Each structure stands twice: as structure tokens, then as C-alpha cells.
Image (cartoon, rainbow, N blue to C red):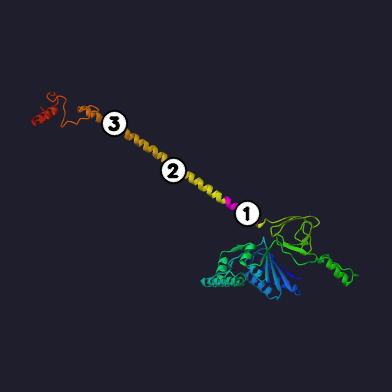
Amino acid sequence: MAGQIFIYGGIGLDVRNHEVSSQDVRNQIDQNKAESELVVHIISPGGDVFEGEAIYNALKNSGKKITTHIEGTCASIATLIAAAGDTIIMNKTARFMIHNPKITGMQSAADSRDLRHVADQLDQIKTLLINVYLNKTGLGKEKLWELYDNETWLTADEAVTMGFIDESVDAIKAVATVNLTKFKMKKTESLWAKFANMLSTFKNAFTEALADGRVIVVESEDEDWTGKKVSFEDGSPVPAGEHQLASGKKIMVDDQGNITAVTEAEAPADKQQNEEMDNKIKELEAQLAEAKTAKETAEATAAAAQSQAASANAKALKFENRVSAIEKDFLKLKEEAGITVGDTKDLPKGPVFKNANQEQKGDPMGDFALQFYKNRNLVK
């Protein structure tokens, strides 16, 4: 039977915030000295880098075979702790996140040398983290460095593909457990009777974490939980009502501590279909917006063209009226010159008078012109 190690919460020394320290983990290891294997359950957002390194080393130095169960979020320095496992198993609805180490809450003044020293320390920590996963993933330093730079979040299946974990599962099955709070020995019982009574309380069980981090144990021979008994890992009853699991699953518990209904988490395929549908909707919305913009542009262009056409028509009408006026003036001049409308004969040379031999009274300019042409034998 494997010993159970639980790392639920942030990594650090703050007891008030229920952080898990390296001393907490060492105490749990000591409580399982007789066991040759350890199962480490992790739901943690990360925290103190140095406490995380100490926990990783404590697990590695235990000399026991270690299986890591990632049951919810495993982020930041918690991913280093997960790497202590010889085998790493992750719930399909859990999340795995790696990012560059950061420094926060500097309480004292620092000059440029101090800041450069801090930066060097952060790079060393990052190199340590990358080296741990270098051989396991086979991704290469450059790729791992890029993943840490970009704060990469992975699903269980993505983590398997990249080599960070070994297996993704829907539910993590625990080893056989016994509720010792139910075991009481009568004074007259023999040792064999005690042992037989204890064996009768063993059941195959599933362990999962609630959304708030508390661990529940479902007494079931298979993955069908409906009608099965559920309790917390310390044997205390789970309150009646609906409970959300860290995996996304929901269970309904009655007053007797039995599960009456199970609502599965959204399947990855359904989630992917929903995401694809959302993407298609966004794409169509973008196309619709683009079409509306094109329509507005076309309408504006048509309106401008219509305005230009109206302006051109007005100009054409103006020129047409001008041409008509010029034609009228031209016809009038031809009539005055003695040329009728439609006459195709060549125009006479020189000025033409209706009666050149008749003197014009009261027209000195005409008299002068007539005398000018007579002197040159142009008229008689």
C-alpha cells in the first residue's frame, strides 16, 4: 500500500493562508516510512521558489518510488514538485502552467548592482527548472526557454504531447483505503477477528479534490459513482447538496452521504466544438462588419458620383445654352452681312453694303468707308 502525500494550496511558510512548507511534506514522508511507494497529490498555484525546491529534494531523497497526481491547477514552482514523480499523472480537466521565476515585494532599497544580482539569480532558477524537464520532455533548451518566457498554460493532453507528464486520465483511482474511524475492537475479540474486521472495511475507492481543495473519497468498485458512499479523506461526512469538483465534475449528495447524481465536466470534444463555433461566429461577425463597411463605402462613392454627374449635367446645360446663344448671334451676323440662312455660297470679299451707290445720310463712318473703297476701285 502506497503512502499518500497531499500538497493542496500555495507553497510557502504562511500557515494562516494554509500554505504547504517543506517541513509539512517531510512530516508526511516520515508518517509513511514503512511504505515503499508514495503518491503525491497536487493542487497548487505555486509560491515560494526555495520551499518548492526543498519539497522537490525531500521527495527525491526519500528513496521511494513516487507517483505524482496532478488533480487541479499545477503552476509555477508546483510544476517542479510534480517533476519529482517517477510517473506523473494528470486529470484531463486540470491545468499545467510554467513561467519565468519572478521577484516580488522587495522591502529594501536596491542599486543597479543589486538588481543585476537578482536578475542573475532568477536566470539561475529558470535554468534549474528547465534542466529538470530537459531530459523528460526532449524539447531542447531553446524551446523550453521560449515556453517559460511566454507563460505557457497546458491542458493534460497538451502536457502529455510535450512530455511534461506521462498520462492524462478522467479520474485518478486511489489505492485501497480503510476508514479507521469506523473500526473499533471489542475486548473479547481475537487478533484474527480484529484483522478480519479491518479487512471487511477495505474498499476500492476513488479520490478527487473539491473545487475548494478538500479531498473526497468515493467508495466504488468502478467509475459509476451514482448510489455510492462519499466522505472526506478523514472519514467525516460530505454535507448534503451539490458539490463542484476541481475536475469540473459535479456531484449531488443526499443526507445519508450517498451520491444521487453525477454531472460530468464538459467533454474536451464538446469544448473544442464550442470553441470552433465561437471562432466561426467571430469570423462571420468580422465578415459582416467588413461587408457593412464596404456597403457604406460603395454608397458614399455612388452618392459622390451622382453629385458629380449632376454637376456635369449642369455644366453641359450651361454650355448648351451658351452654344445656342452664340449660334443666334452668328445667324444674326450672317443676315446683316446679306447671307441668308442655308446659303452655301462663299462669303463676299470685303465689306458688303445693301446699296453701295446710295449715300448714307448721317453716317460719317459709312461715308468714309465708302470713299475708301471707291478710291481703290473696290466698289463703283
**Residue tagged by mark 3?**
325
Name above or below for residue 360 compared with residue 231. Answer: above
Q: Which residue is mark 1?
A: 273
Q: CA distance from mark 1 to mark 2?
A: 41 Å
Screen quadrant of the C terminus: top left
| Towards the viewer: 362 or 331 | 331
Amino acid under label 3?
Answer: Ala
User: Along the horizontal axis of the image, is 88 left or right of 322?
Assistant: right
Classify mark 3: residues with Cα within 10 Å, few (<14), some (14-19) or many (20+): few
The residue at the point 61 percent across, 62 percent down is: 153
Residue 79 falls left or right of residue 362: right
Residue position marked by numbered label 2 in the rendering:
301
Q: Position of residue 127 (x, y in %)?
A: 58, 72
Q: What secondary structure is found at the residue carrying circle 1?
A: helix
Q: Of the two numbered discs 3 and 2 on the same chain, state the one appearing first in sequence.
A: 2
Find the magenta span and give its range. 269-281
Residue 360: percent from left, percent from top: 14, 24
Pinpoint residue 141: horizontal percent, then vertical percent: 56, 70
Tell me which residue sits at (48%, 44%) in the image: 296
Asked whether 25 falls inside the magenta stretch, the response is no
Residue at the left extreme?
A: 375
The amino acid pointed to by label 1 is: Gln
Q: Secondary structure at mark 3?
A: helix
Amino acid residing under circle 2: Thr
Foreground mark, 1 or 2?
Answer: 1
Q: Position of residue 286 (x, y in %)?
A: 53, 50
How far separated are the C-alphas under marks 3 and 2?
36 Å
Mark 3 or mark 1: whose residue is earlier in sequence: 1
